[in-house]
Amino acid sequence: MEAQKAGKGQKWIYLDNAATTAVKPEVLEAMKPYFCENYGNPNSVYTFAQVSKRAVEEAREAIAGLIGAKANEIYFTAGGSESDNWAIKECAQALASKGRHMITTKIEHHAVLHTFEYLEKHGYEVTYLDVDGDGLISLEQLEQAIRPDTILISIMFANNEIGTVEPVQEIGRIAKKHGVLFHTDAVQAFGHMPVQVDEMNIDMLSASAHKFHGPKGVGFLYMRNGIKLGPLIHGGAQERARRAGTSNVPGIVGMGKAAQLAAEGMEARNQKMAAVRDHLMKRVLEEIPYSRLNGHRIQRLANNANFCFRFIEGESLLIMLDQKGICASSGSACTSGSLDPSHVLLAIGLPHEVAHGSLRLTLSEETSVEDVDYVVDCLKGIVERLRSMSPLYEDFVKKQPGHEKG
Ligand SMILES: *Cc1c(COP(=O)(O)O)cnc(C)c1O
């Protein structure tokens, strides 16, 4: 059972693994010695601190090995948002003399989108590529968008809302052909699917530990050797003088352990999750009228399901699911709480009123068929109840031939 004990012993069904994941017990165990025992600053010279230094370097080597990189191409950061900011802002800064044009997509995470919006205010020009109804970019449009002054292509590996996986390898090939740097926000992909920086021609890659059962507040940026970006965080000479600040030793150790665990048995785990997820999708689409699946049916993350239910407000849905002990999301964690529909759902062409009724359910390997069955059973009742209160739905049903009620 994915159900987890909260403070008062309440059981939860946690289906928001795209927002964050539980730290694995083995990860916590690996971290523990680096709080009270081996607490030395890895940059200190005495032997005691070398234990910390060695642990950090082992994590760096492990992570580098998993993506086919060299250890000195991995820079530890405080998470996905920092890695994205660093890659994009410092690339803009470093290559400004070559050009001030950058390419991204309309469906990026806000850590990328808002960084580009910031750069637009500072004299850079950004092309936001459209996506099709499944959330995929067009490789032709990408190639057409490249200009002599284009300095960066930043396209996410896998979308955090609808789960669509972009054709990263082809994007990398196009970037390389035109001599443009390619950064990918792989926060939803690393630890969830195979990522190889050379094969995929990736120059820079962002990842975050808490999305693959590691601790929060730690991540990394892969930066290919030869790329000379300045630091985003100025200060001491940590991370080869590219990222200042005393290393988060327990966090880095935890991320290294989580990355190794994620790589072990990845394929079998994904197959298992996809089977449970497909069962969820099938039941929802067959048993709940006027529901649709968002994102690519095949080319998607194994643990992601995203639906729209017409005549429903996603926020009301979340509150009622919460009352049943179900943790879900209506879009990205950042958009929930605001009344704007998700920019991703608008980008795949959904009208505002449909995009408002969205629900994202993201599984972990612990999620069982019984968990999912409970969720669908609850969801059916909740959707029916919310629709019964909707005048729009009433009008709609009256106009249907046969007046059949959902
Ligand atoms: C979660 C997420 C981020 C932000 O990562 P943090 O470590 O929480 O800063 C960036 N991009 C994507 C695609 C994400 O899912």
Image (tube, rainbow, N blue to C red):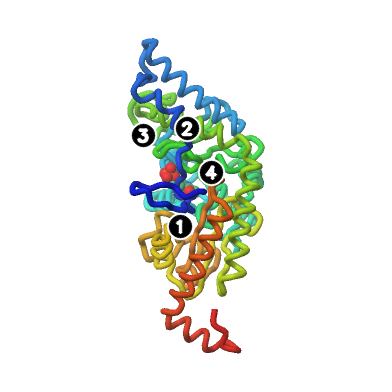
SS for dot 3: loop
- Tag nearer the camera, 2 or 3: 2
- Say which element carries label 1: loop
CA gap, disc 2 and disc 1: 25 Å
The answer to whether mark 4 and mark 3 are in CB contact below 8 A is no
Q: What is the quadrant of residue 267 in the picture?
A: top right
Q: Are marks 4 and 1 in contact (CB under 8 Å)?
A: no
Q: CA distance from mark 4 to mark 3?
A: 21 Å
Q: Residue shown at 65%/42% (left/top)?
A: 268
Residue under label 3, please give it: 233
Q: In this figure, which residue is indicated by the disc labeled 2? A: 27
Q: Amino acid at mark 2?
A: Val
What amino acid is found at the position of numbered circle 3 in the picture?
A: Ile
Label annotation for residue 186: 4
Inter-mark Cα distance, 2 to 3: 27 Å
Of the numbered discs 2 and 1, the one sitting upstream in the chain is: 2
Residue at point 59% right, 55% down? 277
Do labels 2 and 1 touch, CB within 8 Å?
A: no
| Image spot of residue 315 (x, y percent) | 40, 65
Residue 96 can be seen in this image:
no
